Amino acid sequence: MSYSNSQKNLPRAISLLPPVEFATQGLDNEESGAKTYVLPIHGQGVFLFSVIEPSNVEGETVSISFWDTFYKDGLRFTFGVGTLELSRISEETPLAAVNTGFVQNKNAFYWISLDAHQRAIKFGVGEARLETMSFQYVLEGKTTDENHELVRFLEKLTTVKVPSVDSFKPLKLLRDPIVQSSPLRVKNTEELTMGDIANNSFLPKSNLSPIAQKLYDNVAGKRFVLDDESFPQFSQAIEYSIANPNGWCNATLIKKSGEFGEKNLNKTYLRITLGVNSGESPGVPYVMEIWPPGHYSPIHNHAGANAIIRVLHGAISVKLFPFLGTDDEESVAGFAVATFSKDDITWISPEMNQIHQLKNLDGNVETCITIQCYMYDAEDQTHYDYFDYLGTKGNTEHYEPDSDADFVWFKAQMKSEWEAHLKEQEEQFLKSNL
């Protein structure tokens, strides 16, 4: 899936408000009174939607149809809890009927991917990506000519028809179908190799959205480092402040041990902010986060914002989730874990990598220090200013991104503690009799 917009006149993602009323002439009662949305490109794209508390009563289903321009033919998905039936509208026999479909989780959302070029139809639960796919169907003809005809059939599909009921919530249309996994690591153009592209192992920086490219450029420079000439021992000083019972970092971590529910020292990290909140991000846009070994975050989302994360020191492991659960912290299984080391850069978009949990693994020796930067899309008019997270009792909580300290003050504090530590060591050495 590409994150650049090579077709400048076609946005990559479209929020589905307002809908277009469906033309009911010539349709039976089941097809009337619905709403429709036009695909950005005929025969391809991804439709995202949610269903509020889907019914598990046998026989109660939800239908979503992809129609051609004149509503003569198309594809119909019929969903129930744990059931999915795919049909070609002009034919009586279903193409497929499988034991997948809606799940009993109010935070779940769903996606359908249409790819005329590959004759592929996909469905999944959560973020629209291969890792969350639970159903795939490829239209196969008996001959090459029949396959070409199936491609032409899919290319004629222009419109998505959905139920006009309050419990059904269309979310977005994505321009591009789901065709391959999206790499989590980002590389700049000067470092990218042919092998990186061929193996799909890195996302080119140029494939990020314009907003994410801007964030990347702000933190990816060679001089954007922790241990600079003004304080070469900065990372050592942070490690000392965490280990020292009298250190500011140690005391602040203890103070925060109940921030996400019951007291748990390991469920803490420090947020050191750079700059001020200018209204373009959830909280201050630049945050240095400090993760001692064994410390982790709750499972949380990112307010639909773009983000770039760069590791400045140590290593951090990231577990990704399809959507935010509701029962307990294991109610929705993660689908991927990746570990990022010093100078690795990863990304978050409004549609991808939004729900995650971070941890500095127990076996690590070094504290992990990252720089995280956030910004809403230019067309985002909601500006939801909270990170929702999964509480210990399964309820969704709202976390307002705050600051434990300003970066300038924090650096001065670490330098003061480090110099006091060195002075104490020198005095002990002076008094020693080696």
Image: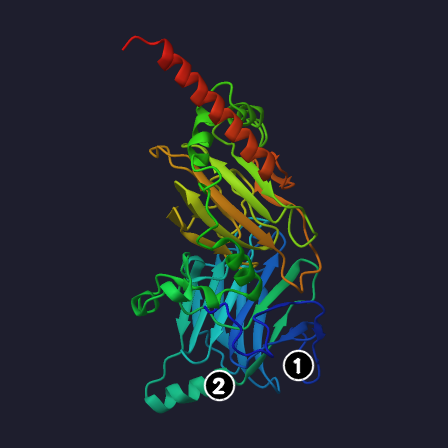
Instruction: Mark 2: give few (<14), some (14-19) or many (20+) Cα within 10 Å.
Output: some
User: 275 above or below 41?
Assistant: above
Identify residue for label 1: 27
At mark 2, the secondary structure is helix
The x and y percentages for residue 98 are 43, 63
The x and y percentages for residue 267 are 50, 32
At mark 1, the secondary structure is loop
Q: Residue 136 carries which label?
A: none
Amino acid found under the numbered disc labelled 2: Phe
Given residues 301 and 411, the one toward you in this image is 411
Which residue, as the protein is rendered here, is positioned at the far front? 430
The x and y percentages for residue 422 are 43, 22
Residue displayed at 54% across by 65% down: 209
Between disc 2 and disc 1, the foreground one is 2
- Split into 4 quadrants, where in the image is the N terminus? bottom left
- Residue 401 seen in this snapshot: yes
Identify residue for label 2: 153
The x and y percentages for residue 386 are 65, 45
- Closer to the N terminus: mark 2 or mark 1? 1
- Residue 406 seen in this snapshot: no
User: 105 above or below 239?
Assistant: below
User: 315 above or below 26?
Assistant: above
Labels 2 and 1 touching (C-beta < 8 A): no
Amino acid found under the numbered disc labelled 1: Leu
User: 58 above or below 333?
Assistant: below
Residue displayed at 47% across by 55% down: 220
Given residues 279 and 393, the one toward you in this image is 279
